Amino acid sequence: MKSLLTVVTTLLLALAITPAQAESMSAEGQWRTIDDETGEAKSLVRVWVEDGELQGQIVELLNPSEPNPVCSECKGSRKDQPIEGMTFLWGLERDGDEWDGGRILDPSNGKEYSAKAKVIENGTKLEVRGFLGFALIGRTQVWERVE
């Protein structure tokens, strides 16, 4: 009887923990971007899934060099638009544990890159890679989840 109670309790705990772990391993949420060159926090972004695609929007720039900066180097509909509120990550589709096949915009220079992302360190960080052509040639940033 005691061992049956132990088994049932263990199963119930396992079921209770699984949804919480799954949620923390989601790429969706709010993240603090960290500049890969300076190591400084750069912005707060919101990441969500819409129609099966991972997207990201800049919520707030931390310590911008000027008030209300715009993407003066961007092309098309983003040209001269405010950086805060801009969707800068789009089109990533789930591929196993990763998101791949999308695009990311660097609003500091207006350039777009191929992008992929992966949740790491038990959901506390998001590894985001922007690259040209091959994933081997590019830059990686590790963003921190904001609770």
Image: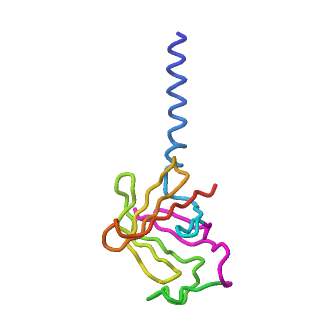
**Left or right, residue 132 beside residue 46:** left
x and y, in percent, of residue 125 in the image = 53, 55
Task: Find residue 116 and report its image quarter.
Answer: bottom left
Q: Which residues are magenta?
A: 40-67
Q: Up-down: is 74 above or below 3?
A: below
Residue 52 colored magenta? yes
Foreground of the two, 3 or 116: 116
Q: Up-down: is 145 above or below 17?
A: below
Q: Up-down: is 38 above or below 15?
A: below
x and y, in percent, of residue 68 in the image = 65, 84
Residue at 56% across / 59% down in the picture? 29
x and y, in percent, of residue 136 in the image = 34, 65
Dominant secondary structure (helix, strand or loop) of the stretch shown in magenta:
strand
Number of marks in picture: 0
Residue at 67% across / 84% down in the picture? 66
Residue at 52% across / 43% down in the picture? 21
**Left or right, residue 145 beside residue 49:** right
Report the residue that reaches farthest toward the left: 134
Residue 44 colored magenta? yes
Residue at 57% across / 80% down in the picture? 83
x and y, in percent, of residue 93 in the image = 37, 62
